[in-house]
């Protein structure tokens, strides 16, 4: 998949009154600070708007478990 510079693909999920963004870690690696990206994406006025973001690292091996990191909309773990 070819992406334009500055575009971060995501999925927005919501349940029980909360909404979260799911982001592939490979798409944000090497870019600006992850906390800053999270704050910008979760901002309800200037960004997508969400309660937090979950960054998912894909496993290197088929039997490995994926690693996830949940961040609040303030960019904190």
Image (spheres, rainbow, N blue to C red):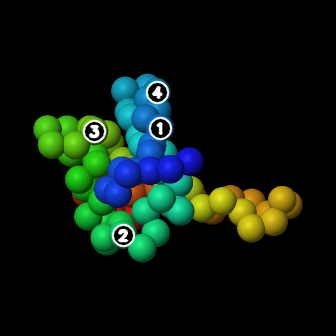
Q: Is residue 75 left or right of residue 15?
A: left
Q: CA distance from mark 4 to mark 2?
A: 29 Å
60 w.r.t. 7: above or below: below
Q: Quadrant of residue 16?
A: top left
Residue 32: x, y in percent? 31, 70
**Of callouts 2 and 1, which one flags the residue occurring earlier in the amino acid sequence?**
1
**Of callouts 4 and 3, which one flags the residue occurring earlier in the amino acid sequence?**
4
57 w.r.t. 11: above or below: below
At 36% from the left edge and 69% from the top edge, which residue is drawn? 31
The residue carrying mark 3 is: 48
Single out the mark in the foreground, 1 or 4.
1
Residue 15: x, y in percent? 46, 27
Single out the mark in the foreground, 4 or 3.
3
The residue carrying mark 4 is: 15
Badge 3, how many Cα within 10 Å: few under 14, some, many 20+? few
Helix, strand or loop under label 2:
loop
The residue carrying mark 1 is: 11
Q: CA distance from mark 3 to mark 2?
A: 18 Å
Q: CA distance from mark 1 to mark 3?
A: 11 Å
Badge 4, how many Cα within 10 Å: few under 14, some, many 20+? few
In contact (CB < 8 Å): disc 1 and disc 4:
no
Helix, strand or loop under label 1:
strand
**Of callouts 4 and 2, which one flags the residue occurring earlier in the amino acid sequence?**
4
Single out the mark in the foreground, 2 or 1.
2
Q: Quadrant of residue 64?
A: bottom right
Between residues 17 and 36, which one lies in front from this camera angle? 36
The residue carrying mark 2 is: 31
């Amino acid at each position: 998949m070819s992406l334009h510079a500055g575009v971060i693909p995501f999925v927005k999920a919501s349940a029980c009154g909360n909404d979260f963004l799911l982001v592939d870690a490979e798409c944000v690696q090497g870019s600006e600070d992850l906390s800053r990206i999270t704050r910008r994406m979760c901002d309800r006025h200037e960004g997508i708007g969400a309660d937090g973001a979950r960054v998912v690292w894909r496993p290197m091996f088929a039997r490995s478990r994926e690693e996830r990191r949940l961040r609040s909309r303030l960019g904190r773990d």
